[in-house]
Image (cartoon, rainbow, N blue to C red):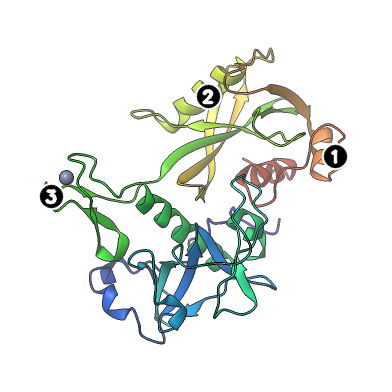
Amino acid sequence: MKRQVPLFADGELDRAAHLRETAPTLWGLSQSRVIAFWGLKPLVHDDGGLHLLSSADPVLADLAGPPVFLGVDGDGDALFAADLSNVKVTGGPADPSFRDETVQRIDGVAQAGFCDLRQIMMSLSPWEAEIAATGRAMFAWHEGHVYCGRCGTQTQMQMAGWERLCSECGHKQFPRTDPVVIMLVTHGNDILLGRSPFWPERMYSLLAGFVEPGEPIEAAVIREVHEETGVAVTDVRYVASQPWAFPASLMFGCRANAKSRAITIDPDEIEDAVWVSRERVMSIMAGDDPDIARPRSGAIAHFLLRLWLADRLE
Ligand SMILES: [Zn+2]
């Protein structure tokens, strides 16, 4: 096994939360580094890896909003995320699907462009992946929280991006992440895969669903599997987590044992579900199955499947 934790889950970013109040004073210093975004797409080198800028770089003169302080780098210098969505780009509009392969470029930055994080995530170091995901999730949260949820007044960013304050009623909002369970359900030598009607042809994956308010993770696994396929599961175990900033999920990777095999799908949730043997999963992972495509590298489903094939899920 190459990776012991899923992509985005290494936890290498020093978030330096104690500096958030004073962090805006570090903006503009040449040693402060910046991950720039356009339309939630990070700036990436043409040969792979993030293209970080100095916060004194003139291309950062026209931001769509205040920069967000992400933490400090290995040298102790400040690390910010900046939103350049107001800046004119070349390369046409982004593709709104989840396979956006377009690249947008701006004047003043050579050999780098804005790329969808899902397209380039496998080219990033664990630290780069974490700062890109954190910046993306933060700007997506700010986009959706411009107005106060209590009184509707426009809110202001505080604490270098880590809260928004309503000056009218005093209500504070903090960045949130949405818990999602994703589960590898086994029955003997087989696992349960399903597909959403919105997915590309031949794509199947582990079942997944949002955890509801007031619901523990284990109950969410049991409920989601039953709702989507009619299969009853037991012995739910947590395996690993993965922040998934598309836009704001935290995936709780779990395993569970099925008590039954009969499948009755809920067509409002999924289009198909099948039991797949270990041998066939190996063939799928090798890209050799005619009916089921290999799962996308980098997603936690891929990680859980590889753990299971290696008998390391316990
Ligand atoms: Zn308010």
Contact, CB < 8 Å: mark 1 with mark 3?
no
Q: Which-is-in-front pick, marks 1 and 3?
A: 3
- Distance, label 1 to label 3, CA atoms, is 57 Å
Under 8 Å from ligand 1: the CB of mark 3? yes
Observer able to see residue 74: no
Contact, CB < 8 Å: mark 2 with mark 1?
no
Badge 1 marks a residue whose secondary structure is helix
- Distance, label 2 to label 1, CA atoms, is 27 Å
Quadrant of the image containing the C terminus: top right
The answer to whether residue 97 is above or below residue 114 is: above
Count of numbered tags = 3
Q: Position of residue 249 (x, y in %)?
A: 47, 44
Badge 3 marks a residue whose secondary structure is loop
Residue at the spot of label 2? 224
Q: Nearer the viewer, residue 28 or 313?
A: 28
* Among the 4 quarters of the image, the one containing residue 271: top right
- Image-based side of 277 in relation to 15, left or right: right
Return the disc, 3 or 2, that comes first in the chain's sequence.
Answer: 3
Return the disc, 1 or 3, that comes first in the chain's sequence.
Answer: 3
Q: Which amino acid, mark 1? A: Ser
Q: Position of residue 222 (x, y in %)?
A: 51, 23
- Image-based side of 158 in relation to 284, left or right: left
Residue at the spot of label 3? 170
- Distance, label 3 to label 2, CA atoms, is 38 Å
Q: Residue furthest left?
A: 169
Q: Which amino acid, mark 3? A: Gly
Which residue sits at x=62%, y=23%? 270
* Among the 4 quarters of the image, the one containing residue 120: bottom right
Badge 2 marks a residue whose secondary structure is helix
Q: Which-is-in-front pick, marks 3 and 2?
A: 3
